[in-house]
Amino acid sequence: MTLLSIDWFFIIEKVLLISVVLVLSLVVAMYSTWGERKVAAWIQDRLGPNRAGPMGLLQPLADGGKLFFKEEIIPTNANKFLFILGPSIAMMVACMTSAVIPWGDTLVIAGHPVSLQVADVNIGVLFIFGVVSMGVYGIMIGGWASNNKYSLMASVRAASQIISYELPMGLALIALLMLTGTLSLKEIVEQQRHGLWNVVYQPLGFFIFLICAFAECNRTPFDLPEAENELNGGYHLEYSSMKLGFFLFAEYINMFISSALIATMYFGGYAFPYMDSLGLNPNMVTILGFLALFLKTLFFIFFFMWVRWTIPRFRYDQLMRLGWKVLIPLALANMLITGAVILARQH
Amino acid sequence: MQALTNRAKAVDRSPMTFMEKMYIPAIAKGMGITFKHIFKRKATVSFPEQKRDFSPVFRGLHVLNRDEEGRERCTACGLCAVACPAEAITMEAAERKPGEENLYREEKYAAKYEINMLRCIFCGFCEEACPKDAIYMSETFAPSNYERKGFIYGKDDLLIPDPKEQGK
């Protein structure tokens, strides 16, 4: 269908795909809040939310409704524009990363191949890194615009933490990229589809990446930027109503995206064992692949929660020591060993 | 010196070994413990549907007692109000008129008897102070309410139903 020399089918396909991915990540984030409370409760021998709807399934709606109807407070001396910009950036950045993740192989609908990836950018990994590092601006701007010294201190804390942990994360990824030889996430998955999962070749790299993902998402044991009970709240100290909701929600979207990313890069993405020898309809295999990726992602979201309710928070100097003195040297060593092995195998 | 219990443990101040410094085994162990707790029996009692049994000496809401003929036992002597450490009880006495012998046991009775359940600390001193066995504490507790007024219990709320009328 080509009109005015524009492929309308392509545009409709992408718009639909974008909406579906966006809705999916929002719904998953919404139900992560429910899941978080349930997991926390189970780990602490409690029942968790069970009043709103069956098993408390309507709880996220009630929470969201509550946040919407709360009074909107903007401090008198706050920079109003930046105050609103902060949570907007946090939310926008969190939603942007899902664009390059391959949610599945191609579906064939009415003769048209439809790739279940919004954009197969050949620099997918770089795109994610660029976008994720923008997330720190949301925190920084939000904390600064509040005109509150505690918010500012918390946002400085957050910024230095995120920047410190981005280094070992990048270094761990470089080893992976040396192995796969591509920056496209789709190709990384395709390689794992026909071989072993990358976690087999890069166990240490995966481990470093996982730890850094915790730090990047501000999740316990690295949730110093928030530190609800110890440090007088965090960068969102002055926020109320849905602006606070956006900050909190962005965290859950980030958690979903990083889980999907870990699953994609180290655990085969939409590939699952024996997927090419099942002899099923290719469309069926694609749908099963999407479900496989979704299950892997849910497992990592559960893992994030499991860790949160097990490990206490780091002290700030311990956090910095772990980042700079342990993870970066480890990531460098991992890179060196990977490079040496690749070189040795070429000769 | 003989230790009181033999459970005292000397603090181990030796430097941590490499495995301990890694924290990973300890974290894995901790996560194992938390994972086991997911499947354990929950301690929660889902209150309105499920109620926990009280102990036999539980002191709940007060009741004003009647005698076998359904006459109020309270003579408004005020001993419960004096005994009350929270000063939750107030009452007004009145004299029994001729013809009211079937309502009140003695010549004096409580025309008004109020307990403020927000002040009450459920200590049971009123029950102990009463010389006429008129006030007792039951096994129910005050239900929630939207207003403070609702927690001031008058005679209508406190008096137990008349045994004669209940028979009908």
Image (cartoon, coloured by chain):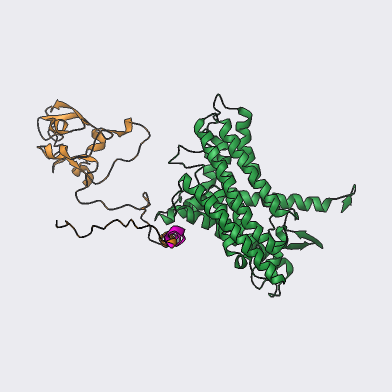
Chain colours: A green, B orange
Left or right for B85, reference A246: left
Q: Position of residue A267 (x, y in %)?
A: 62, 64
Instruction: Please tell me in which quadrant of the rendered image residue A266 appears.
Output: bottom right
- As drawn, the residue found furthest toward the top would be A76
Q: Specify the quadrant that holds the N terminus of chain A.
A: bottom right
Q: Is residue B25 magenta?
A: yes
Residue drawn at 73 percent across, 66 percent down: A283
Compared with B128, A76 (above or below) is above
- Front-most of residues B3 and B39: B3
Residue drawn at 54 percent across, 34 percent down: A152
Taken as a whole, is the magenta stretch helix, strand or loop? Answer: helix
Magenta stretch? B19-31
Residue drawn at 12 percent across, 33 percent down: B101
In the rendered image, is residue B112 in sight?
A: no
- Front-most of residues A142 and A49: A142
Left or right for A288, reference B42: right
Q: Position of residue A341 (x, y in %)?
A: 65, 68
Left or right for A215, reference B67: right
- Front-most of residues A189 and A320: A320
